[in-house]
Image (cartoon, rainbow, N blue to C red):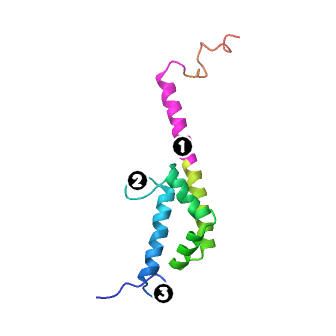
Amino acid sequence: MERLRSQNNGETFDPLRNLWRNVLIVALEDAVGRHWRNKSFGIAKGSHAKSARAWFLEPNRDFVLVCQYAGFDYEYVRMKAKQFFAERKKADEENNMSKVHWEWLHKSKKGSSLPKQRGDNSSSMHNV
């Protein structure tokens, strides 16, 4: 049976390093709200998610140690996490705005308060 190789041919299989890399992955999933219970891809809004994002973004010794154990530069991981969170937040805001617009449009079609169309003879400007 052939042993699996890591992506970097210079790296050897290290179960402890892989364990700490998985710790980072789970922390990132907690920060964005994507894990086995919650299949959402957007930024989670609960206090747990906020504290998970803070773990990545605010200086703390635990984060530095986990990155070192995982074989990563903690400053690089923090920079990439910050970029990722900003992109996800922007995407979520854009997605929410399109939902708000759709809800407004949908509600306006149900009621009698639709804006008047051009060419509608009941317009006050038409009678001037």
Magenta-drawn segment: 93-113
Amino acid found under the numbered disc labelled 1: Asn
- Image point (57%, 46%), residue name: 94
Q: Does the magenta portion include 101?
A: yes
Q: Residue furthest left?
A: 1
Pick whichever of labels 3 and 2 is earlier in the sequence. 3
38 falls in the magenta region: no
Secondary structure at numbered mark 2: loop
N-terminal of the pair, mark 1 or mark 3, is: 3
Q: Which residue is mark 1?
A: 96
Q: Which residue is mark 3?
A: 11
Tell me the SS state at disc 1: helix
Q: Name the front one of labels 1 and 2.
A: 2
List x then y, in percent, for residue 125. 68, 15
Marker disc for residue 38: 2
Rounded to the nearest whole Å, what is the CA distance between mark 1 and mark 3?
A: 43 Å
Horizontal side, residue 19 vs residue 94: left or right: left
Above or below 123: residue 9: below
Q: Residues within 10 Å of mark 3 (few under 14, many from 20)?
A: few
